[in-house]
């Protein structure tokens, strides 16, 4: 009560009421501007119309402050109206950025690299996935999206550090770490089979974000402890402001179509078969209704068959379908009119969001809701998201503020895309095993006639429909509509916090945060499929609590020396609880997808119960001298349950300093130099082991009847694991010139991750497949440059250009073991096609190994074998590719004319290799144009070599003389010039993954204020036309999107592997934004 | 102020600190101890699965000996062993899937202070026999392999040992184990999926294995072979009932891997058909085993052309008996023992009548598969089958009939074919077949060994004369 009385008393002491309006320099009204009476604790904020009223007295000073604007002071005379125009503060160096644990620091106080982007830059192209919306915008943040609806996105900062562990940046929302787990199976990650269910950071509501700050180095992230060693993506959500009320509604729709430049083009000369044109078995013979005739080789999943001939009538796959108009009939042998690209539909995404921000005298609040409905490019796919956000704060007393934040997201997926080498991924058939005579729209009609698996790939050429079925590939429509998966992910994240101002120089924050996720995934294979009917389900609950108690200090030690700091502790506890089960050996009742419908008793479900606890103590001290020099000292100690007790505590320090050169007396007067800052820092971060890597346990396979089995696990655990450690230093130079029209930020960094805790693969001759060890060192070093320039800025027109560039060099310095048992290569994943992803001493992380070309010693040319095919090295462990890009960068342009604004973003990736299983198989089965057509003599490549056919590969014969041997290319079995059958060097299927993409385009028109104000209800109406991924300006892969990968998992080796790649999707649409 | 402290206190007391959370890193869903017999049972399944599977990624030996061929994909019948991870699956299947569990079983028995010494002896002997059999399978497939430094995860780079040295050591181990079977302790019972703890049959099994391993070195070390064969011969299998067979059941995952890969209950694939190489001579001899080996097409047994495209529907298929999920997986049978004895007589290792053993072997095979003794007698009466007249040399007579008797046991058949050099098999040629194909006489090391244990593999490769499918093992003299 005392506090309130005091407040009331003070009110009475004032005698002059001042009112006024605050506007921005562009004329717009500014709601929520803080107005304080200098020398007191009193103040107010402008209302929604930018109006304010404050009681004051003559001679007092009013301070007008607002983020993004220069603070202005006005001395009150005897006027009762004071209108103020605030100048926007474009200086990035003065901006306030949010750093670790939610501390707000001025940019010029930072001793490390951090790049912040605001809401506008994130949402301008209305990307529903925040992770994807960051692509190309931050120097050194390597975002790798994939074309899978709702699929996971990889976010790597400053290169891969962990050889087999997690490399993904940590997401922190309003100071609290949240899970971004990838729950996909190992098979999914290695391209074998499975569905990519996405990662949880994609559920963050973009419209709820105020800013995103990317903390790249260990010095910036050390306070977050172990998990931040891969960098931190710090999300600050919008907060309501006191005495304000603001409603924003966004409504938009986008459409997507596949980018055909990223899809297969098929040869149109030859149809189904393996036997080759003219072979005795290029067709089956039989009578399917209209007399004895040729029957297409249904069961061949290749296009190395007979040459197309419109005059030749052949029984094709539809002749077996009794409901087909061509049942029992022969049809012309021609290339399909509608190839697999006709399978892809128009995607539609609708996104509606409402966000309400506001506050009263002592309170602030925020309520947000976003609904997004996405229909993917594959038939029968949809993804729905409901995102709710709520937060509020209440000043309980003048000293105590309590706040709470709750975010709930509900994601429901239906028919997510299968990935990798999987019948549920239509690209497995379309890119690798297909017949060019199959018309997809006819397949569609055939499925919809009776919703059965009317495949093009019958197992028996003459059996009737009822006794027939697919041998390998389903009708792709059947696969989409019957063998679909569905899933849901419910994610709750929230906290309750209290901030108590103990004294003017110290306050105490306690915060209890909770993050809980429930995942449910169901996968099915319907009766009639090539595989036995099956139902699989996976349920996973994950929760994490974080308790933080933090003391914050801020005090001027002398007139020139400022001190700020914090000391605190955190306790993290997480529990993961999952169960995975599936039917066994088929099902009984068609259409009933339940475990109890299993044909055989089900095997025991796989249960997991994993708990982790980490306690941390941390402290930071920052000293500033005259805005000239800043010094930061940080220390943290963690104790983790995942390590043995004698090894479970680890301490790590960070130190950093900066020097604001431009604040030197002598330089302050230089007109052209706005800002210049040098910084340097060194930091270490420790990390614990994955759960369950110290103690050995057994697996229990399903026993035979009543005879139980136990077995040793694949992985040998290690009780002696010690914490791993990342050491990091960086130097930075930030500068701005000409009133901030031009500026740049340059960073050099070098990090080394030591004693990595790895489940290294070892030869099975040890009795295990993997073993946990502390292994070696991975080094990353590189530079990051971000720069901006505003070349034109006149009355109504401006043009701003932002450029970022990052170059990372990654190297595995050492692995483990000594002397005779020194290991120089760790295999990260063994992939289909005979290539592997490795960490090799002295090489970049993730190098691709396989057979290489043999180069002739004398001429240096590729050697061709006696059959005309390139010779392969006998060793399969040659390094044939490096998936890491040489550099990545982005260029964004914003052009503004009055209220019309055009922005576009180019995203560039230069270098990096990818190995394509699609080409490896698809060229071997004769799908691609290269496998047909004419050779250099003008003869059909598919004619026998004796008749002048075949393919002449450039190179030399074993003796060094130029190659004159044409490789046979007559059929799909051993005698193909391209692809897997000839067993050529794997290096032949390495591609350069460079690209330049027009990632985002947004044209936004803000209705002029004059019109908006007539509409009364509205404050602002923006109409945008947007496009995403409209144009791949440059790439070197002919039929693929080079960015496409298998999701954020590590096992596909930094994205160096493609299997069943999806085409890129061009999105275009519009959005309307209303502010009330 | 007090109220405020109360507000903060619950936060601080919510959680216990890490030191008191000892159970957090414990896997509460998996045990850290289990009965030793369960590892033994699992190892038996691992051994049976690896040797029985027709999966093209694991075991292609039925193709190499041309008992089967493929319909569409010709990589395997044309001996491409690097396309996928074929050697690795076999290698891993035996090292990780069999030997490591046998080792764990042994370790747990030895660590059990309460177990009677006699019981330890007999159980360890059961383990030892299966382990020797498994090591021998690895050696006879790859040649030099990691042995003395193997099975130690602390050493990720085990050296490869000389194949002959390992083999001799295995023979010593087997000899040491055999008497311990009869130590009167309690053997593995129900978990002994081969014999349910019947020691007399284990004794026969152990000695039959000894006979078999000894005969493999008959060309390279005839003296040792002779000694061991003579020791073992009186104690070997005497009827089909003695066979060592893994009792698959109809429920996955304990069903026969052939069914998994070939039965329409579990797959739509139609990869394999019997090869004309074996079907045609069996037709000529009116072999009574045909209905148990193959299906008919228009009442005839028709095999596909080995190593070329074959239309699945145009040829005989592998019989329903073989693709039955509950069809047993043979590890060692009476018929092959009799063939070995016939050979031992011919080589002068033991006394007796080779013809007699040969007749018993053929009869055992026919009756095992479902034919009658009369069928066998009729069959044997044919001049081309009868021992006296079948072929000019005993190697050819035995080699040919053993090849038929070892139908569906591709790996065993491949070993015997390399050793006996009969029947004469030719790699596919003509048409589009790449020139210079040769039937593998050895399996190359897993490709992954190049990246995981490169230097040691390299040394082994040069020691055996090249890591090639054409490098002959030390016992393969002819």
Image: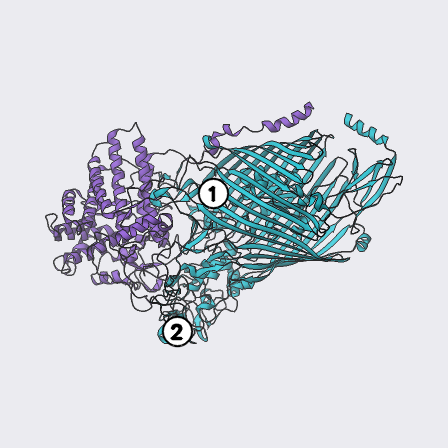
Q: Which of marks 2 and 1 is nearer the N terminus?
A: 1
Instruction: Please give left or right for residue A763 compared with residue A343 in the image.
Output: left
What residue is pinned by disc 1? A580
Q: Please identify which colour was used for chain B in the image.
A: purple
Q: Which chain carries label 1?
A: A
x and y, in percent, of residue A791 in the image: 70, 58
**Secondary structure found at label 2:** loop
What residue is pinned by disc 2? A949
**Secondary structure found at label 1:** strand
x and y, in percent, of residue B129 in the image: 25, 41
Residue situated furthest top in the rendering: B2
The quadrant where residue A977 appears: bottom left
x and y, in percent, of residue A70 in the image: 75, 45
Dot 1, how many residues are within 10 Å of its Cα: few (below 14), some (14-19), or many (20+)?
Answer: some
**Chain letter matching colour cyan:** A
Whole-number angstrom distance, CA of label 2 to CA of label 1: 54 Å
**The C terminus of chain B - image quarter:** bottom left
The quadrant where residue B133 appears: top left
Residue A125 seen in the current view: yes
């Amino acid at each position: 009560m005392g506090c309130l009385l005091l407040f009331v008393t003070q009110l009475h002491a004032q005698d002059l009421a001042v009112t006024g309006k605050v506007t921005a320099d562009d004329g717009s009204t500014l709601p929520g501007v803080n107005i304080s009476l200098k020398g007191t604790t009193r103040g107010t904020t402008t209302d929604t119309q930018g109006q304010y009223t404050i009681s004051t007295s003559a001679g007092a000073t009013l301070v007008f402050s607002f983020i993004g604007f220069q603070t202005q002071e006005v001395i009150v005379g005897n006027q009762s109206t004071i209108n103020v125009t605030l100048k926007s503060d474009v200086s990035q160096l003065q901006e306030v950025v949010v750093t670790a644990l939610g501390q707000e620091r001025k940019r010029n106080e930072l001793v490390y690299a951090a790049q912040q982007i605001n809401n506008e830059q994130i949402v301008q192209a209305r990307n529903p996935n925040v992770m994807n919306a960051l692509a190309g915008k931050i120097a050194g943040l390597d975002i790798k999206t994939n074309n899978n609806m709702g699929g996971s996105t990889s976010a790597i900062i400053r290169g891969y550090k962990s050889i087999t562990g997690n490399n993904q940046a940590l997401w922190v929302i309003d100071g609290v770490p949240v899970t971004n787990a990838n729950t996909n199976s190992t098979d999914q990650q290695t391209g074998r089979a499975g569905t990519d269910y996405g990662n949880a950071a994609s559920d963050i509501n973009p419209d709820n974000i105020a800013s995103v700050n990317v903390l790249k180095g260990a010095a910036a992230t050390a306070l977050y402890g172990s998990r931040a060693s891969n960098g931190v993506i710090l999300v600050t959500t919008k907060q309501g402001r006191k005495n304000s009320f603001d409603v924003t509604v966004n409504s938009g729709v986008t459409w997507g179509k596949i980018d055909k430049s990223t899809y297969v083009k098929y040869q149109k000369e030859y149809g189904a078969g393996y036997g080759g044109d003219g072979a005795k078995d290029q067709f089956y013979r039989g009578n399917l209704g209209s007399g004895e005739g040729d029957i297409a080789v249904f069961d061949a999943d290749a296009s190395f068959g007979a040459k197309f001939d419109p005059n030749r009538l052949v029984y094709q796959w539809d002749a077996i379908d009794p409901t087909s108009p061509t049942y029992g009939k022969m049809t012309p042998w021609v290339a399909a009119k509608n190839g697999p690209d006709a399978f892809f539909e128009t995607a539609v995404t609708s996104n509606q969001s409402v966000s309400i921000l506001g506050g009263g005298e002592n309170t602030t609040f925020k309520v947000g809701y976003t609904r997004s409905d996405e229909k993917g490019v594959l038939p029968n796919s949809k993804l729905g998201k409901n995102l709710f956000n709520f937060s509020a704060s209440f000043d309980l007393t003048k000293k105590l503020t309590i706040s709470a934040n709750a975010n709930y997201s509900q994601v429901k997926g239906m028919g997510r895309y299968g990935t990798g080498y999987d019948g549920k991924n239509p690209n497995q058939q379309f890119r690798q095993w297909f017949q060019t005579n199959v018309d997809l729209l006819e397949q569609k009609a055939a499925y919809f006639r009776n919703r059965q698996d009317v495949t093009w790939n019958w197992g028996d050429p003459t059996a009737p429909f009822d006794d027939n079925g697919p041998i390998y590939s389903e009708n792709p429509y059947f696969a989409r509509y019957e063998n679909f998966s569905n899933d849901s992910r419910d994610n709750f994240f929230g906290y309750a916090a209290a901030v108590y101002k103990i004294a003017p120089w110290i306050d105490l924050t306690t915060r209890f945060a909770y993050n809980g996720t429930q995942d449910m995934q169901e996968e099915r294979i319907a009766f009639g499929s090539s595989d036995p009917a099956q139902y699989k389900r996976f349920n996973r609950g994950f929760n994490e609590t974080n308790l933080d108690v933090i003391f914050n200090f801020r005090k001027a030690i002398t007139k020139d020396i400022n001190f700020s700091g914090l000391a605190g502790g955190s306790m993290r506890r997480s529990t993961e609880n999952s169960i995975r089960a599936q039917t066994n050996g088929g099902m009984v009742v068609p259409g009933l997808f339940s475990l109890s419908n299993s044909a055989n008793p089900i095997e025991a479900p796989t249960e997991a119960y994993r708990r982790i606890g980490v306690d941390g103590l941390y402290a930071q001290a920052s000293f500033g001298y005259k805005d000239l020099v800043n010094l930061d000292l940080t220390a943290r100690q963690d104790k983790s349950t995942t390590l043995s007790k004698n090894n479970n505590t680890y301490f790590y320090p960070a130190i950093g300093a900066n020097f604001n050169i431009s604040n030197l007396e002598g330089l302050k007067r230089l007109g052209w130099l706005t800002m210049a800052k040098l910084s340097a820092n060194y930091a270490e971060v420790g990390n614990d082991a994955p759960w369950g890597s110290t103690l050995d346990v057994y697996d229990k396979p399903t026993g035979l009847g009543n005879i139980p089995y136990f077995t040793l696990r694949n992985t040998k655990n290690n009780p002696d694991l010690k914490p791993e450690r990342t050491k990091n230093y960086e130097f930075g130079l930030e500068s701005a010139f000409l009133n901030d029209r031009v500026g740049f930020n340059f960073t050099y960094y070098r990090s080394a991750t030591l004693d990595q805790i790895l489940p290294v693969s070892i030869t099975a001759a040890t009795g295990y497949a993997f073993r946990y060890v502390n292994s070696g060192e991975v080094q990353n070093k590189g530079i990051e440059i971000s720069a901006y320039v505003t070349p034109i800025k006149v009355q109504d027109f401006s043009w701003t250009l932002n450029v970022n560039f990052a170059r990372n060099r990654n190297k595995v310095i050492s692995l483990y073991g000594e002397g005779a048992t020194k290991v120089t290569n760790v295999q990260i994943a063994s992939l289909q096609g005979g290539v592997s992803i490795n960490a090799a001493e002295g090489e970049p992380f993730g190098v691709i190994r396989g057979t290489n070309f043999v180069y002739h010693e004398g001429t240096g040319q590729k050697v061709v074998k006696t059959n005309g095919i390139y010779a392969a090295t006998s060793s399969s462990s040659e390094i044939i590719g490096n998936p890491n890009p040489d550099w990545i960068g982005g260029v964004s342009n914003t052009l503004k004319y009055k209220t019309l604004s055009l922005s576009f973003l180019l995203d560039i990736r230069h270098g990096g290799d990818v190995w394509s299983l699609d080409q490896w198989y698809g060229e071997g089965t004769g799908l691609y144009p290269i496998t047909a057509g004419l050779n250099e003599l003008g003869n059909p490549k598919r004619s026998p070599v004796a008749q002048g056919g075949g393919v002449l590969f450039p190179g030399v014969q074993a003796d060094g003389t130029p190659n004159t041997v044409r490789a046979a290319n007559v059929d799909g079995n051993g005698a193909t010039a391209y692809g897997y059958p000839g067993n050529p060097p794997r290096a032949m299927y390495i591609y350069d993954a460079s690209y330049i993409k027009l990632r985002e385009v947004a044209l936004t028109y803000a209705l002029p204020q004059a019109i908006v104000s007539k509409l009364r209800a509205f404050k602002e109406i923006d109409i945008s036309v947007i496009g995403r991924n409209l144009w791949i300006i440059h790439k070197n892969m002919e039929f693929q999107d080079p960015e496409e990968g298998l999701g954020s998992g590590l096992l596909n080796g930094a994205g160096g592997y493609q299997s069943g790649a999806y085409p890129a999707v061009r999105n275009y649409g519009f959005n309307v934004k209303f502010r009330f | 102020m007090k109220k405020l402290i109360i507000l903060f206190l619950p936060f601080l007391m919510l959680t216990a600190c890490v030191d008191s959370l000892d159970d957090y890193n414990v896997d509460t869903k998996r045990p850290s101890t289990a009965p030793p017999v369960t590892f033994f049972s699992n190892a038996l399944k691992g051994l049976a699965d690896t040797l029985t599977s027709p999966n093209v990624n694991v075991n292609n030996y039925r193709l190499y000996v041309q008992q089967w061929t493929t319909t569409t994909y010709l990589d395997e019948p044309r001996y491409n062993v690097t396309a996928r991870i074929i050697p690795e699956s076999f290698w891993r299947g035996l090292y990780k899937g069999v030997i490591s569990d046998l080792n764990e079983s042994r370790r747990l028995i030895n660590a059990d202070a309460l177990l009677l010494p006699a019981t330890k002896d007999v159980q360890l002997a059961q383990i030892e026999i299966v382990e020797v059999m498994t090591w021998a399978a690895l050696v006879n497939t790859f040649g030099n392999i990691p042995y003395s430094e193997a099975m130690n995860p602390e050493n990720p780079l085990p050296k490869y040992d000389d194949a002959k040295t390992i083999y001799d050591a295995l023979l010593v181990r087997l000899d040491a184990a055999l008497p311990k079977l009869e130590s009167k302790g309690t053997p593995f019972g129900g978990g002994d999926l081969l014999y349910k703890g019947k020691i007399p049959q284990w004794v026969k099994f152990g000695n039959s294995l000894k006979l078999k391993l000894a005969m493999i070195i008959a060309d390279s070390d005839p003296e040792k072979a002779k000694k061991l064969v003579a020791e073992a011969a009186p104690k070997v299998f005497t009827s089909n009932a003695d066979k060592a067979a893994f009792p698959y059941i109809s429920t996955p995952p304990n069903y026969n891997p052939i069914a998994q890969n070939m039965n329409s209950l579990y797959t739509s694939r139609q990869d394999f058909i019997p090869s004309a190489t074996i079907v045609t001579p069996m037709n000529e001899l009116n072999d009574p085993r045909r209905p148990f080996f193959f299906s008919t097409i228009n009442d005839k047994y028709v095999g596909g052309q080995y190593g070329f495209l074959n239309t699945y529907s145009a040829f005989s298929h592998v019989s329903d008996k073989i693709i039955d999920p509950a069809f047993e997986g043979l590890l060692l049978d009476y018929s092959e023992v009799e063939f070995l004895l016939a050979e031992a007589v011919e080589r002068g290792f033991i006394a007796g009548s080779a013809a007699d053993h040969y007749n018993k072997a053929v009869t055992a095979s026919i009756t095992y598969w479902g034919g009658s003794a009369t069928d066998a007698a009729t069959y044997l009466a044919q001049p081309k089958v009868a021992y006296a007249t079948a072929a000019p040399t005993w190697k050819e007579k035995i080699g040919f009939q053993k090849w038929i008797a070892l139908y569906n046991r591709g790996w065993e058949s491949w070993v015997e074919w390399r050793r006996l050099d009969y029947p004469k098999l030719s790699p596919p040629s003509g048409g589009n077949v790449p020139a210079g194909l040769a039937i593998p006489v050895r399996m190359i090391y897993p490709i992954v060994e190049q990246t995981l244990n490169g230097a040691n593999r390299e040394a082994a490769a040069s020691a055996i004369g090249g890591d090639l499918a054409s490098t002959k093992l030390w016992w393969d003299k002819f």
